[in-house]
Amino acid sequence: MDAAVSTLTALAIFASTVEHAAYRSVQGYRVVGRKGGGWVRWERWVERQFVLSLSFPRCVEVALPAAAPRILPAGWRSRPVFREGQTVDTWRCIVAFDSVAAVAPSSPPPPVLSPFVNPQLQYLSNLYNDLLMVFRFREEKTVPQLVNSKQPIRCGEQGKTSDLGDASESDSDGDCQSGKELAPPVQKHTRANRKHIDSITLVDIAQYFHLPIRDASKTLKIGVSILKRKCRQYGIPRWPHRKIKSLDSLIHDLEFVLAREDEDEEEEKQLQKDRLAAAINALTKRKSMLESEKETIQQKPAMDLMAETKLFREDVFKRRYRAKSSVMDMD
């Protein structure tokens, strides 16, 4: 068998209903290769399992457990077709694409599976390229052609570029000044479909709380004002992106401090063992509280940050400022 060419024909992503961040993909490829003196075509199906996350640790592929049931049925004869919402054992299909069975994703993927939102997917080249192909293809199919592709015509040149001369066109030529181009057509903005707007739920919106509101509205394919109105309907007076970003920054700072404390632990073990252990326990407890508060805000975005968190944030800002000032003084 000589070198073969593979083309994606089907992609289904399943999320585990019992394990956090566990996903499986089922991919079908049309393979064309030369064997002997002729061409051979067949379909190849692959099932993979991943651990996917928007934060550390990065996205990784893991081996399929030997005793675990497979999504691809054993010994199947007919071509498998998967659809969104379909469940297989403890796995639920959340993305389905099949060019042969005319199955297309019904909505944008969740952030962890979006090639445009989660750059860590690049560590999984096969899955990343397939997702990019599916959703790029879908955007090209659904975006209407709004801009006229014709080049502007100079006045007085219409008779040279067109063999079809109308009286109305010849009359309009007389009103133009030589050397000036006709104004290009105005690009119109399409309005979001009313059914699409009504179908957006709080769960759909909550998936994009970590994004700025403009990016979230683009991903949901609605305007910013419409997204704000939907948020008010669900009791969300203000988009919670800044609060979540602030909590993420505090959690990141604590992780950095904890990592640095672990590195220095051996050196200070003899002198400050008890004090160091108490500090690490306090920082770990603080990190756990911040992560818990972040999850609560994601579920109840109208809730404000706790007073203790605000004081802690102010203390972090002051320490950052003092550290920055000391560096500038040294320079």
Image (tube, rainbow, N blue to C red):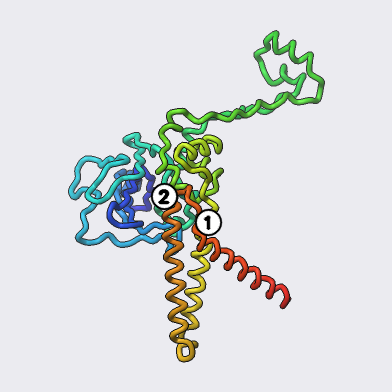
* Horizontal arrangement in the rendering, residue 66 relative to residue 328 (left or right): left
From the image, tell me which residue sits under label 1: 245
Q: Which residue is found at the position 62% from the left and 68% from the top?
A: 318
Asked if 194 appears above or below 251 in the picture, the reply is above
Q: Which mark is residue 144?
A: none
Three-letter code for the amino acid on which mark 1 is drawn? Lys
* Horizontal arrangement in the rendering, residue 44 relative to residue 207 (left or right): left
Q: Residue lying furthest right in this view?
A: 178
Three-letter code for the amino acid on which mark 2 is drawn? Gln
Between residues 188 and 212, which one lies in front from this camera angle? 212
Which percent across, then down, holds residue 307? Answer: 52, 60
Q: The residue tagged with tag 2: helix, strand or loop?
A: helix
Which percent across, then down, holds residue 20? Answer: 33, 57
Between residues 279 and 1, which one lies in front from this camera angle? 279
* Horizontal arrangement in the rendering, residue 156 relative to residue 197 (left or right): right
Q: Which residue is found at the position 30% from the left and 53% from the top?
A: 16
Asked if 89 appears above or below 283 in the picture, the reply is above
From the image, tell me which residue sits under label 2: 299
Labels in figure, total: 2
How many residues crowd mark 2 within 10 Å: few (<14), some (14–19), many (20+)?
few
Quadrant of the rendered image containing residue 18: bottom left
Residue 24 in sight from this viewpoint: yes
Q: Residue lying furthest left in this view?
A: 75
Q: Residue lying furthest top in this view?
A: 167
Between residues 25 and 264, which one lies in front from this camera angle? 264
Which percent across, then down, holds residue 186? Answer: 65, 27
- Of circles 1 and 2, which is in front? 2
Q: Which residue is found at the position 46% from the left and 56% from the top?
A: 122
Q: Which residue is found at the position 39% from the left and 57% from the top?
A: 52
